[in-house]
Amino acid sequence: MENRLKHYRELKGWSQGELARRLGVSRQTVNAVETDKYDPSLPLALRMARLFEVAVPDLFIDHWEPEA
């Protein structure tokens, strides 16, 4: 899974700490998501998408395709 969290965070000019504060999580959580070491829970992914005013699939891109 690919994520664009860092891209959207940088567009806002926010540090990881600022994004973490706005989401109610630790800076380490933001870093782990940005570096693909942690997939956020669905509620956290929804909060992230809502904060950046984008759809979840715009923030988290899953390249998986079902077998035919």
Image (cartoon, rainbow, N blue to C red):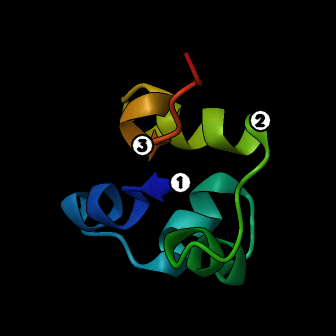
Indicate the position of residue 13 as horizontal and vertical percent values. Answer: 24, 68
Q: Residues within 10 Å of mark 3 (few under 14, many from 20)?
A: many
- The type of residue carrying mark 3 is Leu
Indicate the position of residue 54 as horizontal and vertical percent values. Answer: 36, 29
The residue labelled by disc 1 is 1
The residue labelled by disc 2 is 43
Between disc 2 and disc 1, the foreground one is 1
Indicate the position of residue 44 as horizontal and vertical percent values. Answer: 71, 44
Point out the tag, 3 or 1, that comes first from the N-terminus: 1
Eyeballing the image, is 42 above or below 22?
above
Q: Residue at x 49, y 35 (%)?
A: 49
Point out the tag, 2 or 3, that comes first from the N-terminus: 2
- SS class of the residue under badge 1? loop
Q: Are marks 3 and 1 in contact (CB under 8 Å)?
A: no
Between disc 3 and disc 1, the foreground one is 1
Q: Residue at x 35, y 62 (%)?
A: 9
Horizontal side of residue 40 vs 9, given as left or right = right
- The type of residue carrying mark 2 is Pro
Comparing 25 with 54, the one in front is 54
**How far, Cα to Cα, is label 3 from label 1?**
10 Å
- SS class of the residue under badge 3? helix
Q: Are marks 2 and 1 in contact (CB under 8 Å)?
A: no
The residue labelled by disc 3 is 59
In the orientation shown, which residue stands out farthest toward the left? 11
Q: Are marks 2 and 3 in contact (CB under 8 Å)?
A: no
Q: Residue at x 70, y 58 (%)?
A: 39
Residue 25 occupies which quadrant of the picture? bottom right
Eyeballing the image, is 28 above or below 52?
below
Comparing 57 with 49, the one in front is 57
Horizontal side of residue 60 vs 25, given as left or right = left
